[in-house]
Amino acid sequence: MLVTIDENSGFCWGVVRTIEIAEQTIEQNKNSEIYILGEIIHNPKEVQRLEQKGLKTIFHNDLSKLNQEKAKVIIRAHGEPPSTYKMAQDLGLEIIDATCPLVTALQNRVRKFYSEGYQIVIFGKPHHPEVIGLRGVCNDECIVIQTEQEALEKVDFTRKTLFLSQTTMDKHLFNKIKETLETKVKELHAFDNYREQLVVKDTLCRAVTGREEHLRKFAMENDVVIFVAGRNSSNGKSLFKICSETNPKSYFIEEIEEINPEWFNNVQKVGITGATSTPRWYMEEVKLAIEKITK
Ligand code: SF4
């Protein structure tokens, strides 16, 4: 029986980078207290692994309790609004910025267009940490939408507008909203002017948007698919749905102990995949466990 791990699964490079920064910081600062502001990743196993190395997860209201002599506070890949940096500075805390460079570029873009007087329209979840950061760079003077209906109700079509997206939103829906906005702007403004009136930036992250198509192919190529993710991972739920729609013999597990040996009866090819929050090292352990069970 052949057991393979999906090459495209696991953490995106932005999260890998943040984890590397956290590990280096711990390694190089043995006498300091190293904190991460918010969970580094929505995966209990990876959080636990880094906690064992010395990384402590804190939240905004913990900042004022830290020892400024010893504390170093890491900003995770999603980024933070300017108010967080200001608060840390006022408290005399050292910040280590591990914001994903793509998120920083997105923040800079919002800052630029906001300063030029554009109406900022963000396709995203209003309380997602990345969107909170984006809202912060434009003093919360923006519109956050999730549907075409909201776009029509909330956008002021008389204003010059920048439309962009949280990096991990659905590409199909982004394009639909974009078309809705363009149609409306074309109705109200001279056709030649509409591109000045509405600036659209596709800021979806290619590290995640390409995964669905690949996942369908991977699920089809294998007789059985073992999908590994935390039960609370929303990305895990939606990617597993794609897997099980493509291959009904797809099984969701969080722990190795959940593997049922009967799943592998008369099976030639087993594929292991997971969410963007599933650590590679745990998928390797799942692979070893399956190989042991089926030997
Ligand atoms: S922008 Fe892309 S690469 Fe960066 S953290 Fe988000 S998903 Fe990962």
Image: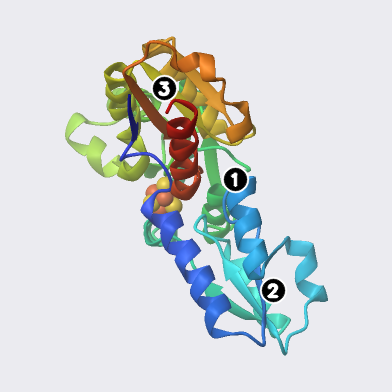
Q: Nearer the viewer, residue 51 or 77?
A: 51
Residue 89 in which image quadrant: bottom right
Residue marked by disc 3: 225
- Furthest-right residue in this view: 65
Q: Amino acid at mark 2?
A: Met
- What residue is at 20 percent from the left and 30 percent from the top? 191
Q: Amino acid at mark 3?
A: Val
Q: Is residue 36 left or right of residue 110?
A: right
Using the image, tell me which numbered label, if any, was put on residue 201.
Answer: none
Q: CA distance from mark 3 to mark 1?
A: 20 Å
Q: How many marks?
A: 3
Residue marked by disc 1: 43
On the image, the x and y values in percent for residue 45 come to 61, 48
Q: Is residue 218 above or below residue 196?
A: above
Q: Earlier in the sequence, mark 2 or mark 1?
A: 1
- What residue is at 41 percent from the left and 36 percent from the top? 158
Q: Verify CB contact (< 8 Å) between mark 3 and mark 1.
A: no
On the image, the x and y values in percent for residue 291 come to 42, 33
Q: Nearer the viewer, residue 49 or 100?
A: 49
Using the image, tell me which numbered label, if any, was put on residue 87.
Answer: 2
| Placement of the N terminus among the 4 image quadrants | top left
On the image, the x and y values in percent for residue 167 come to 42, 44
Q: Nearer the viewer, residue 119 or 271?
A: 271
Q: Verify CB contact (< 8 Å) between mark 3 and mark 2.
A: no
Q: Amino acid at mark 1?
A: Asn
Q: Secondary structure at mark 1?
A: loop
Residue 6 in view (yes/no): yes
Depth check, mark 3 against mark 1: the one in front is: 3
